[in-house]
Amino acid sequence: MQVDLNADLGESFGFYTLGDDVGLMATITSANIACGFHAGDPSVLRRTVRLAKVHGVAIGAHPSFPDLAGFGRREMHLPHGEVEDSVLYQIASVGGVAAAEGLRLQHVKPHGALYNMAARDRQLSGAIVRAITAYDRTLTLFAPPDSELAAAAHECGLAVALEGFVDRGYDRTGHLVSRQSPGALLCDGRAAIEQALRLVKDGTVVSVDGTIVEMRIDTLCLHGDLPGAAARSAAVRSALEAAGIDVRPIGRSQLG
Amino acid sequence: MQVDLNADLGESFGFYTLGDDVGLMATITSANIACGFHAGDPSVLRRTVRLAKVHGVAIGAHPSFPDLAGFGRREMHLPHGEVEDSVLYQIASVGGVAAAEGLRLQHVKPHGALYNMAARDRQLSGAIVRAITAYDRTLTLFAPPDSELAAAAHECGLAVALEGFVDRGYDRTGHLVSRQSPGALLCDGRAAIEQALRLVKDGTVVSVDGTIVEMRIDTLCLHGDLPGAAARSAAVRSALEAAGIDVRPIGRSQLG
Amino acid sequence: MQVDLNADLGESFGFYTLGDDVGLMATITSANIACGFHAGDPSVLRRTVRLAKVHGVAIGAHPSFPDLAGFGRREMHLPHGEVEDSVLYQIASVGGVAAAEGLRLQHVKPHGALYNMAARDRQLSGAIVRAITAYDRTLTLFAPPDSELAAAAHECGLAVALEGFVDRGYDRTGHLVSRQSPGALLCDGRAAIEQALRLVKDGTVVSVDGTIVEMRIDTLCLHGDLPGAAARSAAVRSALEAAGIDVRPIGRSQLG
Amino acid sequence: MQVDLNADLGESFGFYTLGDDVGLMATITSANIACGFHAGDPSVLRRTVRLAKVHGVAIGAHPSFPDLAGFGRREMHLPHGEVEDSVLYQIASVGGVAAAEGLRLQHVKPHGALYNMAARDRQLSGAIVRAITAYDRTLTLFAPPDSELAAAAHECGLAVALEGFVDRGYDRTGHLVSRQSPGALLCDGRAAIEQALRLVKDGTVVSVDGTIVEMRIDTLCLHGDLPGAAARSAAVRSALEAAGIDVRPIGRSQLG
């Protein structure tokens, strides 16, 4: 049994610092790096790529709607052609900085509202998938299980890593509970570890109303903006490894 | 005898249109494409790359200070490390979009205030050169003759194409007259053609005070934001060709 | 019989010029001035306020979602508190610049997607109305007839000027046809004049499918971004005046 | 004897939090509130104005170069007309939000590089002074002693409050030591208190090389971005009051 452990990094901006990138990078296997559209800037991006290199963490682009003021969490309705071009631009910026440091991208994970909207919208997902395949057909897309985003990738022959969240609550249909609703965040570290183990070992998750839902995943996401994120990430990783699970990067696709 | 003919393109932004890209692209051999920092956006960038492909025009990144409000023409004082990271990010975005369209970058030309400041400042130039070589050592840098920017490139083994301006006035030291001064712009098409021919055939330019100044150049720049830019560019190209000069892209460096 | 004639102005940005503000300002009675969020910048704003002063045109703030890249035409989902604060900030900026030139604001007209979404959404409209009344209870809100925006204003005792469009098509329910649909724009000058006269004299509009729809309006909007906008605006005004209609600003509210 | 105690507040942005506004607001008498150009956003601005109201703290606008990425600390060279319009826009936004909360502005303090450049440049200072007087002639300008900024204000009859820094080092000419040089920041709380007392009681400051320099000031600035800023501010205020100094807002000018 194996699993990838990912987190969103490189989300500082200029004078503003966000998240414990140094702490988290030591415990994860894949980093989703902000591209400057919801967070990050060219110097933060490069520093984060270098930090990933030091720790042997695989890197991915984390493109977003252009919304620094809203941290990419606000739904926006853009023409699909603009989404495609914008995602391509963002992947290119991270991919080029990575190349300058001698690294290749492993994956792409849409951020925030773009991820959530794409999960439900095949057309929007198609734009994202076209951007990725235009850049590099061997990249892996991180997407929620049973989502339009995953379906759009399959349709185009793009490799998908199904993603489960360690510290977010699910409803009985296997979808994330909205951040505004009770149970959205698992603040208790023990509960997060349990959810991680269950997702990997059993292929299930317990929903906020107690239902056991089937959910097969390839990569686990931890949120870096919760207090104590690095310690929690380390604890999750230790628990996974103690359970005999191999925690390692998802790897580049062999499909392309 | 041969020369490259370049212009700044892809400078529209969102709802705002600037320049006659379609007209200009048909007459030049190298396009400097805006990266979104002084102008351009992801969709404009991609459209411009595709247009260059159709016309067989070689493409370059045209990085700038981050200054959309000032079109990159305002001097800014950034730490050199930030300049390096910013230029790398911008080259990466154009390079990645080009790759998605099956093209490779030929060159990099800094824009506006960044170009002018770098021409006088070796340290700033060093930051730009480091960004370029980190991305791809075989790119060519467009730089003014007798400039710190050209010197910094030579020092690092980066190929340089020396650039002369068809429609800008020079002073007796061989430097551009400030845009605020008389004679800064050659609005007369005949004068522009004469300056182009003289630069290529004689390796000289006539300064605003009538002095003949030696100036060896490899590429000629035309400004796309002057009225009738496409017609002027076509006229300059015809005149060069009629004089037996081979007008063609500078090409990628063999040095890298 | 009387009517106000309004247009969106001050939508240039930095190096980018948009619209014929000088031509339009000579023919309208109320100007909706961009606040820098979808278009405009501090210098464009001040220049536009001064131009309105010269022509005796009443001025209003034209707040938008923060979306320069999309010209404020893309739907965005912001928390209502953020919309309220953002609209207040934008009104304050135009109001303060106007005061520095010895003028007072007459009105507020939300822009683009904010206007269209508010027309259908009472909660969003409430946020806009709260921002206006917090700034100045005697301002007039420009809103579509039979809209949630007009209703929200009435509920709070804020004066409303109902707005009809001279150059946009309506459906049989009295709502604007989407910009993507056929008949969205009345490009024929004669048709625009006819629609203007009918709206003011008869209180009706002919929908794109030929139905006569009742529509009482107080102010007519002309789009400045169509070709020949200033000439069209002059023609509409002449036709209105020739029909004995008094074309003048809506005026500040006496309600406050 | 009396003195005003000021700090920069409202510098959070969107998802990014900066500074301990709640802690600082309880200990100061004047707040310099960011306008959204180097920091702050419409919601942060309004929240900060409301917080000042609760604590009876006088408010001022804190305009900057448009440089969110550089926190307004990077020198930029803008045409003076653009600086004037930009500063007017920023004052208007804070002034209008304050008015919506029933407050009037007390002062204006330029931020970062704008403040430092204006201190040495009469022309740039003139642009700032023109913006302030266009908005409200009774505002007070915060400026360094013996500066071009103070001189420009005097010339136009604009009231000035001379400002000393509690936690920054001075050179023997009475100017601030650059942030990059040793002694730039007084990290020791005791030293800051001593500098505050000496500035108010003796009208002098001890420079980084030990020289006693005459310096008459009206308002003391504390930096909110240093660790423990609120506690330090409270300690400075206590020490001032224990020394019989009346700590209160500078007040609006009677000159206008």
Image: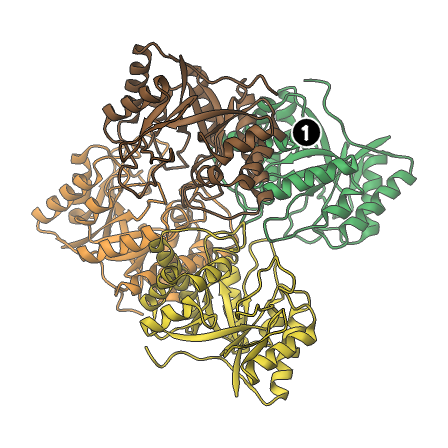
Chain colours: A orange, B yellow, C green, D brown
Rendering quarter of residue A104: bottom left
Q: Residue at x 33, y 12 (%)?
A: D241
Rendering quarter of residue C39: top right
Q: Quadrant of the N terminus of chain C?
A: top right
- Amino acid type at circle 1 is Leu
Q: Position of residue C148 (x, y in %)?
A: 62, 30
In the image, D21: left or right of B42?
left
Q: Position of residue A200 (x, y in %)?
A: 18, 49
Query: Could you tell me if residue B215 is visible in this image?
Result: yes
In the image, C55: left or right of D71?
right
Q: Residue at x 44, y 15 (%)?
A: D56
Q: Residue at x 63, y 48 (%)?
A: C12
Residue where numbered disc 1 is placed: C105
Q: How many marks?
A: 1
Pick the residue in front: B90 or A77: B90
In the image, D127: left or right of C246?
left
Q: Secondary structure at mark 1?
A: loop
Q: Is residue D247 above or below residue C68?
A: above
Rendering quarter of residue A107: bottom left
Q: Position of residue C93 (x, y in %)?
A: 58, 33
Subunit ID for the residue under disc 1:
C
Q: Residues within 10 Å of mark 1 (few under 14, many from 20)?
A: many
